[in-house]
Amino acid sequence: MTAAATVTAAVLVIGDEILSGRTKDRNIGYIADYLTRVGVDVCEARVVPDVEDEIVAALNALRARYDYVVTTGGIGPTHDDITADAVAKAFGVPIGEDPRVIAIMLERYRPDELTLARRRMARIPAGAELIENPISRVPGFHIGNVFVLAGVPAVMQAMLDFAVKRMKTGAPMLVETVEAGAVPEGLYGDALAAIAAAHSEVSIGSYPSFKDGRFANQIVVRGKMEAAVVAAKSAVVAMLADLRSKV
Amino acid sequence: MTAAATVTAAVLVIGDEILSGRTKDRNIGYIADYLTRVGVDVCEARVVPDVEDEIVAALNALRARYDYVVTTGGIGPTHDDITADAVAKAFGVPIGEDPRVIAIMLERYRPDELTLARRRMARIPAGAELIENPISRVPGFHIGNVFVLAGVPAVMQAMLDFAVKRMKTGAPMLVETVEAGAVPEGLYGDALAAIAAAHSEVSIGSYPSFKDGRFANQIVVRGKMEAAVVAAKSAVVAMLADLRSKV
């Protein structure tokens, strides 16, 4: 049994509105969930403001390091939408109005409705492939290992379906969750550390949540090899049963 | 009128569970909202896994660049909680069991309940100050310009109240929102760009949302000088009224 090939990704969320707290990001979680399920491991996420140098720096750091980068936000028609220009700058390629996008827009708008603002959305870096947008038509794009999606969650989600089809995917992460419930982390932490040390092919996490004044804990076993995940989960279940029998 | 002093911060979310999508982060939005209101500008956020080198690298990048870094996650009792050790490594200081934390824990636990796992939560980098935790008692800590908080939102939020008391704060950001409703961004984008260019003391963003098959737009004016924010908002309101009168 060999470890499955690993495919990695980062998420780059672009937008002042996330950093001011005005808009609560829902894209990182959605993309993380989605990519994890198809076998692409999200290794990092960043949120940067609508500032070209910041976007360029983050893009170049992330695209050099991971197989893929998925960006969200900043591809609309208003002056604060500067993602396409930043991506072109990061890749050092020219950017201009893409006739493919103009053609798509003309299916929706009359020529006199193509305001300068709307034409901004046709600015696509040279060499990029378009990413379909079944919601509001105007596409995202894909250049090198970077996928540029909308910020509005419904639109981003629709685009992501198309983006993922162009990614190579690895073995999906297998995830098993064991409910520890009210057993305190501090009571099982030592035994869990021993299990984690003995099962190095998987990663084991312990996650408390707090609701109505009480903590409840879950232990999560993650790995790409089924036998290893099953074995570690069994060890966790047995450890909790043993602890509960002693209480 | 002089521009108010700017205080900056970054948020560093630590945890595999966010990057796998298992847990949806709610801390970035909460902290961004809170700090923005007290006049601390959140300029960047990152999510990194429970990997020491990754935490150290992100911490050192962010603490060098911003006035403050607020971290969430990784300070519990289990083996995957490695934030305190990573912070000590980033600062190049020793870490050991802090008698102040042991004393706090002994108010809650009998000595024989102080498992090795629980004692892990007493590991605090040398020179750090504790941050109160009114929910589950075991504190966070503060070293240099880094504030280390829990990952569970209720606990993080309680700790943040205490953390912010130790920060210098700038002039709060003033935010005015204008409902553009169903007026398309593509229709007002050109005029809005002109307003943004003429009102450079504020930042103006346009934010679409999509619900029940329809887009609705909001225009947000942000700035630290009241007169400038009011003037830009008036220009936006007048521009929209003009557009609506022409439809």
Image (cartoon, coloured by chain):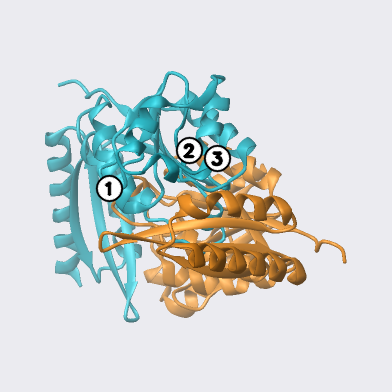
Chain colours: A orange, B cyan
Are the residues under badges 2 and 3 in a single subunit? yes
Image point (38%, 31%), residue name: B101
Residue B82 disc label = 3
Q: Position of residue A90 (x, y in %)?
A: 62, 42
**Helix, strand or loop at mark 1:** loop
Going from the N terminus, do you reach mark 2 or mark 3 first?
Answer: 3
**B156 vs A143, nearest the viewer:** B156
Tell me if residue B75 can be seen: yes
**B239 vs A59, nearest the viewer:** A59
**B173 vs B62, nearest the viewer:** B62
Question: The disc labelled 3 sits on which kind of residue?
Answer: Ile
The span from disc 1 to disc 3 (Cα, nearest Å) is 21 Å
Residue A129 disc label = none
Question: The disc labelled 2 sits on which kind of residue?
Answer: Arg
**Helix, strand or loop at mark 3:** loop
Within 10 Å of the Cα at label 2, are there few (<14), some (14-19), or many (20+) other Cα atoms?
Answer: some
Chain ID at mark 1 = B
Above or below A227: residue A209? above
Q: Which residue is mark 1?
A: B135
Q: Position of residue A216 (x, y in %)?
A: 39, 63
Q: Position of residue B105 (x, y in %)?
A: 36, 38
Tell me if residue B194 can be seen: no
The span from disc 2 to disc 3 (Cα, nearest Å) is 13 Å
Going from the N terminus, do you reach mark 1 or mark 3 first?
Answer: 3
